[in-house]
Image (spheres, rainbow, N blue to C red):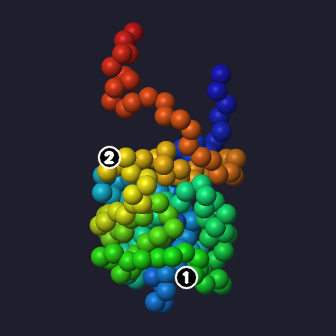
Amino acid sequence: MKENLGDTNALYPLVTTLVGSVVDGKPDFATVAHVGIAHLKGITLGMGKIHLTNEGIKANREFSVSIPSVAMVEVTDYVGMASGKTIDKSGLFKVFYGELKGAPLVDDCPVTMACRLIEHVELPTHDLFVGEIVETHADVDVLTNGVVDLAKVRPLLFDMASKKYWSLGEPLAKCWSVGKGYSAP
């Protein structure tokens, strides 16, 4: 038997990210877990309109998405609680810039991506940003055969229901392989 939970979104946990933009000439960051994949080079962000970071994304049409490791849980949570409108977040991280000067990349994160804004949709309480990845930078120690290895990244996962951060467990099965042994009834 199932219980009706109403309009509860049960897609959690989601990877926790630090979204960056340049506001008034300085990098600003927001902690965002409402991220999605539009296609292989496309990212979507659902960001509350209260974030100062949104202003930089709209003005520059560029942003970064960095993936903090579990070792960064305290500063990542702080960034999510502190408003860029009252706290200068520009000194929280060592940043660098690639091709996009409006996308501050967090050097402290094992993986960071610079994105160009493709579309902005204004929702009642949130901004929906659709971006295209221009470049991805990863620490060499989180790569296996030139590919980002999640076990080495150790990303933070966010769960709204429990209001807790989680970490990844062990791999379960190989995609596009485990199903080959399944026999349909």
Please, what is the three-letter code of the amino acid marked with disc 2? Asn
Q: Quadrant of the N terminus?
A: top right
Position of residue 103 relative to residue 160, above or below, is below
Q: Quadrant of the C terminus?
A: top left
Residue 70, picture quadrant: bottom right
Position of residue 94 relative to residue 80, above or below, is below
Q: Could you tell me residue 156's position as x and y percent?
A: 57, 53
Q: Residue at (61%, 84%) from the top-left corner?
A: 88
Label annotation for residue 145: 2
Residue 11, picture quadrant: top right
Q: Residue at (37%, 64%) from the top-left corner?
A: 137
Q: Could you tell me residue 39's position as x and y percent?
A: 31, 52
Q: CA distance from mark 2 to mark 1?
A: 34 Å
The answer to whether the residues at label 2 and label 1 have Cβ atoms under 8 Å apart is no
Q: Which residue is mark 1?
A: 90
Q: Is residue 17 visible?
A: no
- Tag 1: Cα neighbours inside 10 Å, few (<14), some, or many (≥20)? some
Q: Residue at (65%, 34%) from the top-left corner?
A: 4
Asked whether 13 or 6 is in front, the reply is 13
Q: Residue furthest bottom?
A: 24
What element does badge 1 sit on?
Answer: loop
